[in-house]
Image: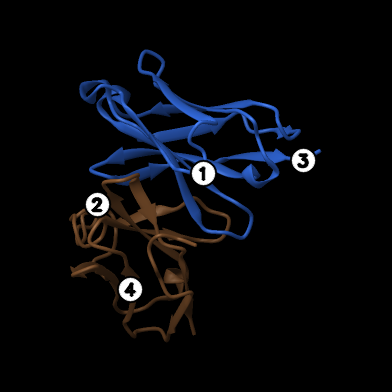
Chain colours: A blue, B brown
């Protein structure tokens, strides 16, 4: 059974950093691209970042709203995807999801981890 | 403002069919067959219901179908059931940023 479990969400002050983790199981992690999304309270889904499998160079893509502040990475030996978030702003407050991606759709989602940015 | 345009809400009675539209441009919906649809119930994670315009993942009811014409994709739910109520999001591959989403459509089953 495919499972994605996010962790690392917390209450942080503006300007601080946070690293989210997404632990995967039930599939060969290294064969798949992964993405991070977020959903602010009462709002829609926002795609944030994407990392290809090592077969495709583990190259990355970012939404304009987080480019330069967020960094996605992966550790295939541990089956974990990461999202490093720097210079956090109050508008980054949201539930953050990781997904397994296949042919540019997200076929499995985790349950999310909550990030609250507030002074 | 979302890159893909969806109606804010749609509604239908049990047993009826509804269609949710998703309008983009030739750089996303119209240019690639990588449109996907997601269902989200309150307090739950999204769930993929359609990928590559019209394909259903294993386990998704055949009451869900997808199509595309030009720059507009559509999700149709036939034989509407109470459990279909929730939010629906469309997404497309785009050459500029890889993924783009619609703002979501709230489906109410009357």
Q: Residues within 10 Å of mark 2 (few under 14, many from 20)?
A: few
Same chain? Circles 3 and 2: no
Q: Nearer the viewer, mark 1 or mark 2?
A: 1
**CA distance separating discs 4 and 2:** 23 Å
Q: Give x and y (percent) for residue A29.
A: 32, 25
Q: Nearer the viewer, residue B90 or B1?
A: B1
Tag 4 near tag 1, CB within 8 Å: no
**CA distance separating discs 3 and 2:** 41 Å
Q: Quadrant of the N terminus of chain A?
A: top left
Q: Secondary structure at mark 1?
A: loop
> In the rendered image, which residue does mark 3 sit on?
A118
Q: Image point 30% across, 23% down: which residue?
A: A58
Which of the numbered marks, if any, corresponds to residue A65?
Answer: 1
Q: Is A105 left or right of B6, judged from the image as shown? A: left
Tag 3 near tag 1, CB within 8 Å: no
Query: As displayed, is residue A49 above or below residue B49?
Result: above
**CA distance separating discs 3 and 4:** 37 Å
Q: Nearer the viewer, mark 3 or mark 1?
A: 1
Q: Image point 31% across, 65% down: which residue?
A: B24
Q: Chain of mark 2?
A: B
Q: Nearer the viewer, residue B27 or B8?
A: B27
Q: Residues within 10 Å of mark 4 (few under 14, many from 20)?
A: many
For the view shown, which residue lies furthest in the top direction? A77
Can residue B4 be spotted in the picture? yes
> In the rendered image, which residue does mark 2 sit on?
B58
> In the rendered image, which residue does mark 4 sit on?
B21
Q: Give x and y (percent) for residue B107.
A: 46, 74
Q: Secondary structure at mark 2?
A: loop
For the view shown, which residue lies furthest in the right direction? A119
**CA distance separating discs 3 and 1:** 19 Å
Q: Image point 64% across, 31% down: which residue?
A: A87
């Amino acid at each position: 059974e495919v499972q994605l479990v996010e962790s690392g969400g917390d209450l942080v002050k503006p300007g601080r950093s946070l690293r989210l983790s997404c632990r995967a199981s039930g599939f060969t992690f290294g064969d798949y691209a992964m993405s991070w999304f977020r959903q602010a309270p009462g709002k829609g889904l926002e795609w944030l970042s994407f990392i290809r499998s090592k077969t495709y160079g583990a190259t990355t893509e970012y939404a304009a709203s987080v480019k330069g502040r967020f960094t996605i990475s992966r550790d295939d030996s541990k089956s974990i995807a990461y999202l490093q978030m720097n210079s956090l702003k109050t508008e980054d407050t949201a539930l953050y999801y990781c997904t397994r991606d296949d042919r540019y759709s997200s076929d499995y989602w985790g349950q999310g981890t909550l990030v609250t940015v507030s002074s | 403002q979302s890159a893909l345009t969806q109606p804010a809400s749609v509604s239908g009675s049990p047993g009826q069919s509804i269609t949710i539209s998703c309008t983009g441009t030739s750089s996303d919906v119209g240019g690639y067959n990588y449109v996907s649809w997601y269902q989200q119930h309150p307090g739950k994670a999204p769930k993929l219901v359609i990928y590559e315009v019209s394909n259903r993942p294993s386990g998704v009811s055949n009451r869900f179908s997808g199509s595309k014409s030009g720059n507009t994709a559509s999700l149709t739910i036939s034989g509407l059931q109470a459990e279909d109520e929730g939010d629906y999001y469309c997404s497309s591959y785009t050459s500029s940023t890889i993924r783009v989403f619609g703002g979501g459509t709230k489906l109410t089953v009357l």
